[in-house]
Image (cartoon, coloured by chain):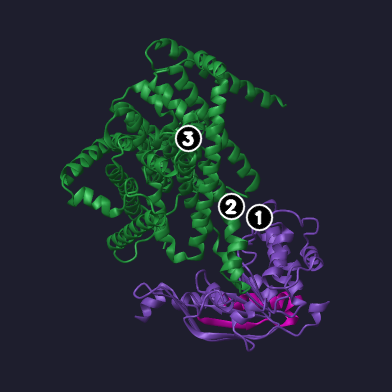
Chain colours: A green, B purple
Amino acid sequence: MTAQARHDLARQALGVLAVLLLWHLAAQAVLGSYMLSGPVAVATYLAEHHALIGRALWVTVQNAGWGFLAGNLAAILLVLVVALLPRMRVIVAAIALVVFCLPLVATGPVLRVLYGPGPGPQITLAALSVYYTTFIPLLVGLRAAPASWFDLMRLYGRGAWTTFVQVRLMAALPYLMAGLQIAAPAAFLGAMVGEFTGAERGMGVLSIRAMRALDVDATWAIALVAAAVSMLAYGAVGALARRLSHGRPDILMATAPERARGNAMLRGAGLAGVTLLVVLALWWVAMEAFDLSRFFAKRPDDLWRFLVTAPGAEGNRAALWAASSQTLVQVVPGYLAGLALGAVLAMVLVLVPWLAGAVLPLAIALRSVPIVTTAPLIVLALGRGSAGTITIVAVMTFFPALVACIQGLRQAPGQALDMMRIYATSPLMRLWHAQIPAMLPAFFAAARMSVPAAVLAVTVAEWLATGRGLGALMAMTASTSNYNMLWAAIVVVAAGSCLGYALVAWLERAVFSRVAPEQLRG
Amino acid sequence: MAEAMSPPGPDIICTEVAKTFGDAPAQVEAVAPLSLTFAGGQMTALVGPSGCGKSTLLRMIAGLEPPSEGAIRMGDESPQAMQRKGALAMAFQDASLLPWRSVQGNVALARKLARQDADPDAVAGMIARVGLAGFEQARPAELSGGMRQRVAIARCLVTQPRILLLDEPFGAVDELTRARLNVELPPLWQASATTCVMVTHSVREAVALADRVIVFSSRPARVVGDIAVPDASRSDRVAQLALVDQVSAALSRGWDETGPEARQAAQ
């Protein structure tokens, strides 16, 4: 070991000790308040219950692993469909988004009825929470090759298949690995949410039990183990990616918005209409094909009766509306605060580089933690009011935004920055004129992907803790078998998420066509 | 050597070839209708101001860009037919190597794409002839810019093409490397009597390498000079300088004719 390596190791060890000490002191300060459990208490709990935690962890890891496999396989198949039928790209991507926006906390109970006992729902939820973050970068990756590589294939009279095998597939590999890396902790999150919604075994079950029993030590120990396993999975896939790939994509999922052709509003409305029709048809066909009981497997026409024509429909609509507005006032401020904090902190770190060295590794590590699995902690710390929920949403949005914005700020061309330095411009001027414009694609990519994540966070928090909003409505209707309302809530959440995503995409295009029209894809 | 005995490559015949990009009113005329014949087995250099459309002409010859008007034949065949026969090769301004393939892998890929048998000896021989023996297993990222261009040329030549198109192949390397590549590599294709068309910015390079230099005006490309380079001038420095002057004069005529002042005067 070199002197430098020894020095680094010593510094890291010191850092870990400092964090442990701070944690211990903080725990001492709030002793007896049901908020924070110290490192000693957590270690004691883990030592005493290692067999229990080990068994639960094994169950959850298995579920997450199967879900990881199934979800990523589905993503790859979807991308193959798009590669073979390029005209289908927009509609397949839209349907993929709708499915990704289905609220896990509600699909969980529905799947529970469908599958019966066993790990089916957990695995399905894990798959549902990973496929989209693999699908999107892979879609970008298949198109991410210099034009001359495609020219080379055509020069020898070769067609789409050879191009696919020789160029697209290999060019997409780094993007696939980037997607898989994000998917690893996401699969763990999906499996845990699946276990929240009525499983018999696993980390999610232990977590819920500990929180309900106000067992602070257990809640902390379980959340920390879940976080550590997620980080480990993230790191392991990252290491594998570095071994396999010839390069990393610069910005994850920062696909430039497409240049509007013709009337953008009309095209958007057309796409929304077609997507709606296809989704309704798929929904209905799936229910009929498996001959699922109308008691719990509601069809579109059941919901129409429930919300429009049946007696009492007005009351149903009012209940749904009340829950939706309760959720909206929590998710919007949390989402905006998380995004803004992430962007602002990224800018501060660029202006104060020595701070970045300290904060960035921590931020990247924490980004891999599925925040929702630590939701019980935030509920313990901040109580069951709005503050806790908004914080969970903000934290869920904050880390991806921070990491994306830092990556984006670094995309500022070095020569442009040098040119400004020659005129002795202030760092703020450089930030404004070169770095913030370079940050925008990454920022908007994070903003778009954070919409479903924020909705997931708010519904889980409501479901676990606050007893208000759509999350609580879904929990209550699932336990009272009011499946009409449950399905109605699923539709509202999915539609709301897609609408939010579309809104951010529209904003993105508007901003780009104003400040950087050359970046729009033609 | 086998290719030294092969018959010269076919003539490339462009008849009233024109290219416009985009739709009215934002239409851009890249190449005005042009009729040109590139003699088989000869090296023709295309020079002209940046963005004049000479690369577009080269891409049309390669069959990568359909002409808006007119037709291109190679002997009796279309560019597409030549593509399918594996008889075309092109070097791009950046080497355009696939980063996940080794030097050997990149060169071998061309034979595979051209539906030729995987001839490891031919591949190794070509790599050695461009001066990269010992680097067969290196990845493009481990090579210098000049070495990457050597690989690109090896990839072009390993299929023994009838037509070789060079789009500023040495444009992205430094002056010294470029001078060396210009001395070492052209004999490789001159020996095989391939029909060559090269786009370049460098008047000296054009005169040094080509049998004929065609000078284009600013966009849309029109021929403002067509200068034959006699073989005798290769060893005659005075004759070379005279040719460089001649090409340069044609180039500046091309500028003057279409410059802003000239356009104002015409209106």
Residue at (48, 37) in percent of width and height: A191
Residue linked to disc 1: B100
Magenta residues span B222-249
The numbered mark at residue A210 is: none
Q: Disc 2 on helix, strand or loop?
A: helix
Labels 1 and 3 touching (C-beta < 8 A): no
- Find the distance from the CA under tag 1 to the CA under tag 3: 30 Å
Is B77 drawn above or below residue A80 in the view shown? Answer: below
Q: Is residue B94 visible?
A: no
Q: Position of residue A155 (x, y in %)?
A: 61, 72
Q: Tell me: A447 left or right of B134.
A: left
Residue in front for this viewpoint, A306 or A177:
A306
Residue A389 image-quadrant placement: top left
Q: Chain of mark 2?
A: A
Which amino acid type corresponds to the residue marked 3 in the rendered image?
Answer: Arg
Labels 1 and 2 touching (C-beta < 8 A): yes
Residue linked to disc 2: A173
Earlier in the chain: of badge 3 and badge 2, it is 2
Residue in front for this viewpoint, B226 or A471:
A471
Number of residues whose C-alpha sits closer than 10 Å to that of mark 2, classed few (under 14), some (14–19) or many (20 or more) = many
Residue linked to disc 3: A367
